[in-house]
Image (tube, grey):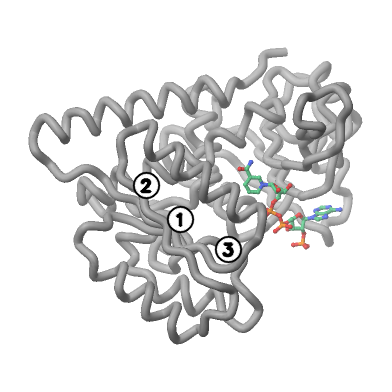
């Protein structure tokens, strides 16, 4: 069994992006600028935005955060989006989800200019992805596709089973892997909570992608001998063995599944580090005006 080292692959991509930024500076081209809009005090959202700022700094991007109280009205937030759409200094921005209940995420996402939608959630970008055209791809699926490509995983003609159909992970990754291109061309089965015979379907997968949100849900008896397993799940549990008092676990029962598969992503250090890298790659494309080339 071989570990798919997401930490190392993410580092390699960050180095490539930083080199690209240096070239832009040398050629007096504007440095990429990523902005985030953060509404309310959600702890996970705060952490994500802080990590994003750190990642921007590492590669030489400019980053800024627009913070608002959770009482902000939908109208005011739409004005903020409009302001960022028109600000030429900003190449791309995200509106961190979840939003408070009185604000429609769909309305906010649809208001973002597609070329600045570096989260890749706008219907124009989702449509381009479905049509196998250029555009921003949602960050986690983008990261997963890079993991597959850079680990030399053969996809053509393989049966890929994706468990979980969320708009941000399962559905886009199932689309990307079924497209007709070099790093896709799989036959894809997309499973969810109403799928019958889940165990049998998973056991027939050459590539199994777990994006369920249930800790250690995928057991060894659901995995084919020699399969490639990509674990998107992220669960923080208490641990007396770490300094922080916490450790991360995935949607896959790593200890038993890793004995059976040919390659697997660990948690942490697999898909996790690739998500912010996906966001950085989208922002670089936006800054270079290469989104729809
Ligand atoms: P989500 O929106 O909660 O979607 C979960 C999906 O799993 C749904 O489609 C659901 O089916 C399906 N599901 C739930 N129980 C199931 C079952 N018993 N059998 C089969 N399918 C089942 O989750 P998400 O946002 O996609 O996230 C999934 C996991 O990835 C979470 O652990 C999350 O923390 C993690 N995540 C990690 C990253 C990263 O950077 N590493 C990024 C995003 C998410 P229905 O549609 O029928 O309800």
Mark earlier in primary sequence (2, 1): 1
Residue 220 placed where, x, y %? 88, 28
Per the image, the residue denoted by label 2 is: 282
Q: Is residue 51 left or right of residue 20?
A: right
Mark 2 vs 1: CB contact within 8 A:
yes
Determine the image quadrant of residue 210.
top right
Per the image, the residue denoted by label 1 is: 119
Between the residue at mark 3 and the residue at mark 1, the CA separation in whole angstroms equals 11 Å
Residue 203 placed where, x, y %? 82, 35
Between the residue at mark 2 and the residue at mark 3, the CA separation in whole angstroms equals 18 Å
Look at the picture and state if 7 lies above or below 54. Answer: above
Residue 201 placed where, x, y %? 80, 43
Q: Which mark is residue 97?
A: 3
Mark 2 vs 3: CB contact within 8 A:
no
Q: Which type of secondary structure does the marked residue at label 3 adopt? A: loop
**Residue at 73% over, 35% down:** 205
Determine the image quadrant of residue 56.
top left
Mark earlier in primary sequence (2, 3): 3
Mark earlier in primary sequence (3, 1): 3
Q: Can residue 131 be seen here? A: no
- Say which of 221 and 271 sits in front: 271
**Residue at 53% over, 29% down:** 147
Whether the residue under disc 1 has CB within 8 Å of ligand 1? no
Mark 3 vs 1: CB contact within 8 A:
no
- Say which of 100 and 198 sits in front: 100
**Residue at 53% over, 75% down:** 106
Q: Residue furthest left?
A: 27
Between the residue at mark 2 and the residue at mark 1, the CA separation in whole angstroms equals 8 Å
Q: Residue furthest top?
A: 1
């Amino acid at each position: 069994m071989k570990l798919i080292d997401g930490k190392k692959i993410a580092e390699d991509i960050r180095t490539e992006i930083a080199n690209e930024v240096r070239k832009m500076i040398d050629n007096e081209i504007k440095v990429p600028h990523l902005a985030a809009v953060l509404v309310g005090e959600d702890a996970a959202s705060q952490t994500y935005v802080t990590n994003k700022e750190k990642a921007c700094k590492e590669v030489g991007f400019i980053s800024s955060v627009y913070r608002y109280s959770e009482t902000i009205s939908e109208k005011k937030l739409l004005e903020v989006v409009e302001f960022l759409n028109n600000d030429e200094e900003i190449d791309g921005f995200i509106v961190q989800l979840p939003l408070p209940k009185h604000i429609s995420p769909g309305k906010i996402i649809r208001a973002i200019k597609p070329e600045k939608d570096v989260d890749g959630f706008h219907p124009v970008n989702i449509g381009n992805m479905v049509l196998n055209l250029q555009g921003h791809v949602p960050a986690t699926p983008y990261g997963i596709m890079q993991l597959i490509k850079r680990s030399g995983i053969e996809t053509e003609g393989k049966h890929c089973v994706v468990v979980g159909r969320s708009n941000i992970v399962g559905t886009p990754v199932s689309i990307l892997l079924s497209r007709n291109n070099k790093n896709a061309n799989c036959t894809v089965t997309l499973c969810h909570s109403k799928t019958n015979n889940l165990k049998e379907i998973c056991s027939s997968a050459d590539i199994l992608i777990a994006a369920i949100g249930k800790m250690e849900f995928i057991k060894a008896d659901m995995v084919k001998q020699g399969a490639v397993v990509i674990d998107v799940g992220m669960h923080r549990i208490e641990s007396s063995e770490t300094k922080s008092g916490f450790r991360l676990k995935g949607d896959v029962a790593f200890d038993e599944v890793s004995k059976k598969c040919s390659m697997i992503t660990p948690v942490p250090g697999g898909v996790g580090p690739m998500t912010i890298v996906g966001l950085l790659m989208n922002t670089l494309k936006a800054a270079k005006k290469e989104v729809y080339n």
